Image: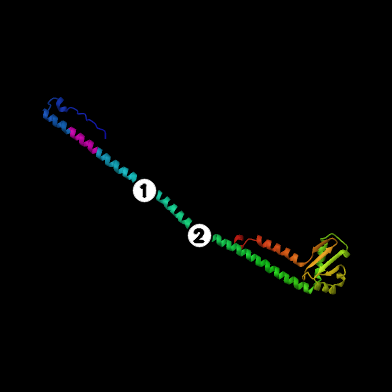
Amino acid sequence: MNAFRPYRFPPLALSGPGASSGTDAMQQQAQLTQGFQQGMESGFREGYDTGLEQGQRDGYAAGHSEGWQQGQSSAQQEVAARFDSLAQPLDAMLQALQQMQGDYQQALRREVVELVAKVARQVIRCELALQPVQLLALVDETLAALPPVADEQVSVFLNPEECQRIRELAPERAARWALTPDVRLEPGECRVRAGNHEADAGCRQRLEACMEQVAEQLADTPPPEAAA
């Protein structure tokens, strides 16, 4: 608070007619000075108290707001950190589960392909056992894909047992080409030689090609969860 020096006005009683004595004038002057001083001090205290109270209220409100924001931010960071620490093992478990599901789907597809191939081989074996002449239809199909040659230049190599049965069951068709038994060929297998060209007309390579297509289609088919 800046120092000040109050100005003392001369008492009116000293300048007017019928002025009081010097003692009375001094007492009045002292009372005025004292009253002025008391008013200044009272006003200062009142202003100080009011300003202090207002400052405390404003400071409390500002501090409370800032503290709440800091506490909220700190709590969010702590929750996020805890969530991350809990989510890491869950993510690992989820990845492991997805890998297991993928492996299971692949194993299931392989088993399906193997089962279909096994059933197909059994069906082919039974059909050829009952009707071995069906091998000649495969020979016709193979010759159609090769450069044309005379029938005399065509040699058909078959399993010895099937070759004998075809000659017995369809001698006119067997006489069309030179049927040759080959002990290296399993039942259902057949090789065709037409001039300088030779091709596999058996059932195995046809079945393998068919199973490859089945496996590719199964591999491209999404699992039920992914399709949903």
Which mark is in front, 1 or 2? Answer: 2
The answer to whether the residues at label 1 and label 2 have Cβ atoms under 8 Å apart is: no
Specify the quadrant of the image occupied by residue 111.
bottom right
Q: Amino acid at mark 1?
A: His
Q: Position of residue 136 (x, y in %)?
A: 82, 68
First in sequence: mark 1 vs mark 2: 1
Residue 175 forms part of the magenta stretch? no
Q: Amino acid at mark 2?
A: Pro
Q: Report the residue at 48% width, 55% height from top.
A: 84
Q: CA distance from mark 1 to mark 2?
A: 39 Å
Provide the residue designation for mark 2: 89
Which of the pair 200/120 is nearer the observer? Answer: 200
Q: What label does residue 171 carry, if any? A: none
Provide the residue designation for mark 1: 64
Residue 77 lies, with reference to residue 37, above or below; the image says: below
Q: Position of residue 19 (x, y in %)?
A: 12, 26
Specify the quadrant of the image occupied by residue 171.
bottom right
32 displayed left or right of 135: left
Residue 35 forms part of the magenta stretch? yes
Region rendered in magenta: 32-43
